[in-house]
Amino acid sequence: MADDAGMKVDEVVDGRGLFCPGPLMELIKSIQLKPVGTVLAVLSTDEGSAKDIPAWIQKVGQEYIKTDKKDGYWEVIVKKIK
Amino acid sequence: MEKVSFVLASDALEKLHAVGLMASVAAMSQMDVRVFVTMNAVTAFRKETIEKKSFRVEGEVGRRLLSKNAPMFYDLLSQGKMMGSLKVFACGMALDLLEEGLDHFHPVFDEVLGVAGFFQHAEGGQILFV
């Protein structure tokens, strides 16, 4: 899968429909299992999570790529760098 | 590692949930987290209370937490323990007054502690009272 900017997404974490902090928890579960270099797209219908996830990425030292508002949900792109 | 501790004294579902949220996300954000459950908050962790979902609700958000089947505070704390450094302590005094042992409560508790023991765990970090 590639997003609008052409970045290759290796893993989609679909947290749509989950209450905060559900999407973040799903990302954490997933990122722990993936190798360094994996690009993940987190999908969230929760606006708070769309802001929380970049803050968490910064806090734990992973790479935040971008957040896009889609039709009824947010897509947050993160790269595992350590 | 940054450290934060919560003293959870209220049995109101909204406050229990707020601590569950903050503590679990803090633990998943590489913080060292301690939760000391005391006073009436202890009763919300009874297996019987959880089974019947007979929590004390203060307002609309609490009612919706139940009607929308949101993950409960004990689920959030359990997830925080799995994914980070989070320990949950039951207040020894409250258990003494209730004349109940930990076997009556949700297994999220690590151990029974007194206030001095909690302060030892919380040393060097912020303590938030809820």
Image: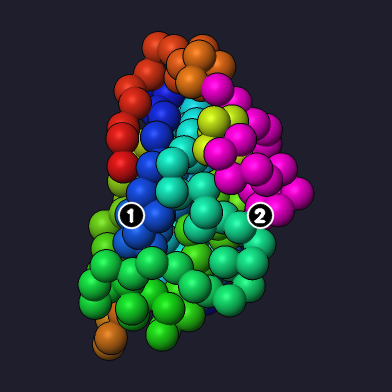
User: Residue at horizontal 33%, vertical 78%?
Assistant: B63
Callout 1: 10 Å neighbours few (<14), some, many (20+)?
some
Callout 2: 10 Å neighbours few (<14), some, many (20+)?
some
User: Residue at horizontal 26%, vertical 57%?
Assistant: A51
* Observer-nearest of B44 and B27: B44
Dividing the picture into quarters, in which one does residue B68 lie? bottom left
User: Residue at horizontal 35%, vertical 59%?
Assistant: B12
Q: Residue furthest right?
A: B103
* Observer-nearest of B98 and A23: B98
Residue B128 image point, x, y percent: 31, 32
Residue B41 image point, x, y percent: 45, 49
Q: Is residue A42 left or right of residue B84?
A: left
Q: Which chain letter goes with mark 1?
A: B
Residue B111 image point, x, y percent: 67, 33
Residue B23 image point, x, y percent: 44, 43
Q: Is residue B61 left or right of residue B20?
A: left
Vertical comparison of B23 with B32: above or below = below
Q: Can residue B61 be seen in this snapshot?
A: yes
Amino acid type of the residue that numbered disc 1 sits on in the rendered structure: Lys
| Residue B15: image tag | 1
Which residues make up the magenta segment?
Answer: B96-114
Label located before the other in sequence (1 or 2): 1
Vertical comparison of B111 with B15: above or below = above
Q: In the rendered structure, does residue A28 fall within the stretch colored magenta?
A: no
Check disc 1 and report its element: helix, strand or loop: helix
Check disc 2 and report its element: helix, strand or loop: loop
Residue at the spot of label 2: B106
Q: Which chain letter goes with mark 2?
A: B
